Image (cartoon, rainbow, N blue to C red):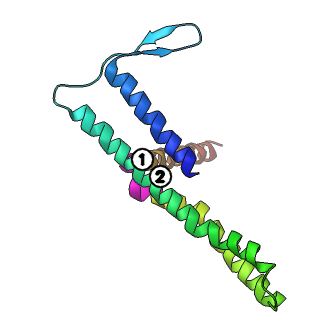
Amino acid sequence: MVLANARMIMNIRQSRRRVTNGTTVPSSDINIPVPNISSSTGTHTRRMSALDRMLFYMMLANAITFITTQVPFHLFICVKGSVKGLNSNISTFIRAVLLIWSSVYFGIAFYFYCLASPLFRQKFIKMLKRAIFLQEITQTITHRSKIHQ
């Protein structure tokens, strides 16, 4: 997971260098020129570094959460066989608690993304508003069709 996140950051930095240098993006048949977007004020550079920082924090939070929620369960499974005299009821209870703890990762990642990324929050709120608006339209249409019947 850490290697995949590190590779993602490397790809983002390479993409940024291609865009700021105004090089061409190779395709299977055609080279498409990419315009130089950098501005004289440097706001684009600051924006990209803020984006890099945001992605780094998200990656770090994701990796730490993954390690703290997944390692205890797998460590227990590996050690359980070598511990002698462990009651099977206690072992089952510990396994169940650690399994629930390892499942927390999949739910908590969403909250970390919302806390760490303003861009993610904006997109999520926009999608939520759109879903609520569509639900209101659907209810209005359903109500009108019932009235006209």
User: What stretch of residues is rendered in magenta?
Assistant: 113-123
Q: Is residue 139 visible?
A: no
Q: Residues within 10 Å of mark 1 (few under 14, many from 20)?
A: some
The image's mark for residue 55 is 1
Residue placed furthest toward the left:
41
Q: Please name the residue that numbered disc 2 is placed on.
A: 59
Instruction: Determine whether label 1 and label 2 are within 8 Å by CB.
Output: yes
Q: Amino acid at mark 2?
A: Met
Q: Secondary structure at mark 1?
A: helix
Q: Position of residue 38 (x, y in %)?
A: 26, 25
Q: Position of residue 138 (x, y in %)?
A: 57, 44
* Residue 92 shown left or right of residue 117 in the figure: right
Q: Amino acid at mark 1?
A: Leu
Q: How many marks are shown on the rendered structure?
A: 2
- Is the residue 6 above or below the residue 87 in the image? above
Could you tell me which residue is drawn at 46 percent across and 11 percent down? Answer: 32
Could you tell me which residue is drawn at 30 percent across and 18 percent down? Answer: 36
